[in-house]
Structure formats: C-alpha cells, structure tokens
Amino acid sequence: MSLITILEHPHPSLRKVAGERDAAAIADPAFQRLLDDMFETMYAAPGIGLAATQVDVMERFMVIDVTEERDQPLVFINPVIRERSVDLRVHQEGCLSIPGIFADVTRADGIEVEALDRHGKPFTLAVDGLLATCVQHEVDHLDGKLFIDYLSPLKRERAMKKYDKLRRHD
Ligand code: NI
C-alpha cells in the first residue's frame, strides 16, 4: 500500500462533478488497490472520510471510518442519499482538503444511503449522527462541493483568510 497525495483547496479538481464508477469493473485489482491506498491515506492523515475526487479520481466512490478504534472501514461506490431526516445535526467539520479549517455545518441528522460495497454488492444503510454527517460531506465532494460552501459569506471569508495565512506559513 502507499499514501496518495490529497488535493487541497483551491485545486480545480475539487470542484468537478464525478461520474459513476463502472460497476462491472469493481473487482479490478488496480481499483481494489486504490481503495486500500485511500484507507491508508485517510488513516494516516488522520481523517474519517476520503472521497475519490480528493485524490484526483473523478469517479463516484469514497471510504469512511468514523470509529475511534479505526476498525470499521466502509466503502461506498456510486452512493445515493435516498432519505434525509427533518431533524438536523450541527457538527464542527473539517476536511483533509482544507487543512486547519473547522466550522459548524448543519446537515440532516439521519440519512438513508444506497451504494455498492467494495465487492460490488448493493447495500442500503440507515445511519445517523457522525456517520450521517460524514456520508453527506463525502457525497458532496463527489458533486464538487466543499463544507465551506455552507458558511455565511462573512464566516467563509474569515475562514479563507485564516486558510491563506496557514498556507503561507507551510
Ligand atoms: Ni472533505
């Protein structure tokens, strides 16, 4: 396995809408290796989710593990969020593509998501809390959307000023 470079805002690839992953080519060894590398990269960062677009692959899939033990890896290929609860949840989000920036984002507390697993098998998952927040954040990535898009203009401007400063000191 090897670590992959994570693209950072404002890389243009982070704003692209990813296309479907060919469901017939999920067993492809190169694809399976990419999934392993994405997990390794996410765990090393450390982060709880990583979408394909963040590693410059314009296809709809992502890896997630929100557990503290880091022992429940989830793969979502061609995920579709079917249901969103009326109840909302506020979470202080960050993103491996916008390092050093954290801000409260309000999303549905519960969701139902359909996807294929890493063996190409369809599954439906009803989740809430942190996992629901994370799935919504990662699906946004596949649509070229970042969590800072949800901030008010003033908050976003402040966050981006801080981000620019952090990057200059890198
Ligand atoms: Ni992110």
Image (cartoon, helix red, strand yellow):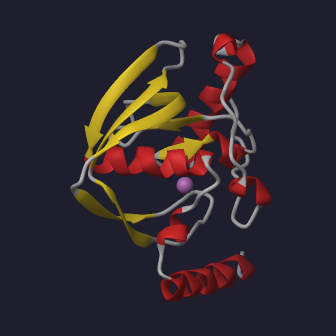
In-front residue for pair 2/167: 167
Residue 66 in the figure: left or right of residue 118: left
Image location (x, y in percent) of residue 157: 58, 86
Image location (x, y in percent) of residue 118: 54, 19
Image location (x, y in percent) of residue 100: 55, 71
Q: Residue furthest left?
A: 87
Which quadrant of the frame does ligand 1 lie within? bottom right
Q: Residue at x 59, y 66 (%)?
A: 99
Residue 1 in the figure: left or right of residue 146: right
Residue 128 in the figure: left or right of residue 160: left
The quadrant of the picture occupied by the N terminus is: top right
Image location (x, y in percent) of residue 140: 54, 51
Residue 34 in the figure: left or right of residue 71: right
In-front residue for pair 170/108: 108
Q: Is residue 49 above or below residue 156?
A: above
Q: Residue furthest right?
A: 12
Q: Residue at x 56, y 44 (%)?
A: 50
The quadrant of the picture occupied by the C terminus is: bottom right
Whether residue 67 is visible here, answered yes or no, is: no
Q: Residue at x 66, y 85 (%)?
A: 165
